[in-house]
Image (spheres, rainbow, N blue to C red):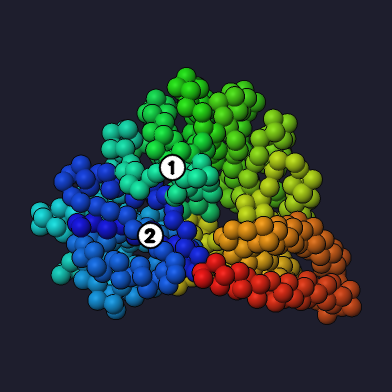
Amino acid sequence: MDVLFVDLPDDFGQPVRSWSLGFRYMISSLRKSGFSAELVHAQAPDARRRLIQRIIRSNSALVGFTTYDVSLSAVLRFVCSLRRAGLKSHISLGGVCTSTIPEQILAAVSAVDSVVFGEGEEAIVDLAKRVIRREGTGPIPGLCLRSTAGVDRGKPRPLIADLDSMPVPALDGVAPHENGAGPYALNGRVPVLGSRGCYGRCTFCCLQTYYRSCPGPVWRGRRPTAVADEIEQVARLSGTTAVTFIDENFMGPGAMGRRHAVEIGRELVRQNIGVRFNFGCRPNDIDRETMISLKGAGLAGVTLGIESMGSDALALFNKHTTPEVNYRALSLTEELEVPTEITFMFFSPLATLAEVGANLEFVNYVRRSKFAYFSGNQPFSEFIPFFGAELTQSLVAMGLVRRSLNGYSVKYKDPRVGFIARQVFRVPVASIRKLRRRFEAVSGNQSLDIAAALYQSYWYLNMVRLPELTYDLLQALATGHARTSSKVLSILEAFESERNKIRSLLEKFCSAADRVGRLCTS
């Protein structure tokens, strides 16, 4: 094998195969240039050890990984483990995260040989020519490459102007699945690309560095006919009836972007493909005419980057939206009965008590909604200081953020907000979700019943109980009560009570999960 791409799971204890659309595009590009390329996934049991052995046995000249900011340290640890296990292949990293800090990675992690910055389809072909065919010398555009002289950084590679000039993504291993979704489906939906880039300039997002550091238009849409043709092929091979557009912003800028979205929907109808789809966009992209047209074409859901309901926070994030714009978009999706996932940053280092209050009001709004829900049903998310993001750099300079390859830490300008955030995040709601997934992975009515009960506990805690306690603590601090006052201490006791309930819940069901797992294995 010339090039091996590795799909690393978020959790080796429960490895889930992802569709890995980016890898599939690169595999096709490599094969078009005469290289052999393949994608491997982790498989239980003993997933980590078996994956390492599989990679070493492949004897590939080039091994590639993609990275996301929150998983970067785990990817780097895995790469170092590969080296310790004896892997001699050239190891290359790519992705939005690594594109912003290629020299930093190469300086700190000797196990990595190169880092792709920007779009990778053309860069990976040139890298394969260098590593495998020994073609060329010196820097390669879009690559930071370790050399005997140190690190050779190529010039930025222009963004691919015509996305349909790329070979269609490889569909290795795609076959019908008994539940109608492909074996690598993303939350039951097959990922498809309708465009690349985002016209926004949000300060918290590293996409700005990723795309705007390379020549060319930031947002580019594919031809609607090509998108529909690809969906038809994927649906036919996988048996899926649902796809997810993984575009950074499906709509694109202004009227032109909305028109492009509508044309994709019309093409799906014209070809009578019969799939339902969802996508992500900004709240200001939502308008009645567009949404009605898309719903008629099969729209099944939308993800909106709301981020905050604090006016100052939205200005800090450079969202170019307002709370009114956010609520108006949600009101329309509610009216049209379109399920709407919300991405949100409840706590951020410069948050005020007023912003916490506005965000709590929004949580109550979502709780009452029939169609809106938070991503992961988790409203209490925290700002992540992405590498390369403008806001991250500002907060580092202010001493509120520390950022390294091993992770990050966040402090709050208003200590009262930090105090509230600490109480909320000390309640281990994520452990309930993780346990629920263990039961969902096992067939049987009893397991499904337990999973359903765990979901109800998870939802109630996130959407009802924690907001209640957070509101009580907010009011106490806002009215001048000290952290050691009897009123605040009584609220802290209530938080501790919820933590104890979760501990009891885990003790009750963890042993049951272990028994179910053993029965399943046997």
Residue 334 position by quadrant: top right
- Please state the horizontal and vertical placement of residue 452, each as a whole percent of the image: 70, 57
128 vs 248, left or right, is left
Element at badge 1?
A: loop
151 vs 382, left or right, is left
- Please state the horizontal and vertical placement of residue 195, each as a whole percent of the image: 42, 36
Residue furthest top in the image: 270
**Residue denoted by label 2:** 41
Q: Is residue 483 visible?
A: yes
Residue furthest front in the image: 522
Residue at the image point whose x is 51% and y is 36% from the top: 241
- Please state the horizontal and vertical placement of residue 315, each as a whole percent of the image: 62, 47
Residue 520 position by quadrant: bottom right
**Residue 160 versus residue 496: which sits nearer the camera?**
496
Q: Are marks 2 and 1 in contact (CB under 8 Å)?
A: no
Residue at the image point whose x is 59% and y is 45% from the top: 305
371 vs 282, left or right, is right
Q: CA distance from mark 2 to mark 1?
A: 18 Å
| Residue kind at label 1, given as amino acid type | Pro
| Residue kind at label 2, given as amino acid type | His
Q: Label 1 crowding class (10 Å Cα cut-off): few <14, some 14-19, many 20+?
A: some
* Number of the front mark, 2 or 1: 1
Nearest to N terminus: mark 2 or mark 1: 2
**Residue 303 versus residue 415: which sits nearer the camera?**
303
Residue at the image point whose x is 34% and y is 58% from the top: 40
Q: Is residue 249 visible?
A: no
> Is residue 496 positioned above or below 293 on the image?
below
291 vs 97, left or right, is right
**Residue denoted by label 1:** 176
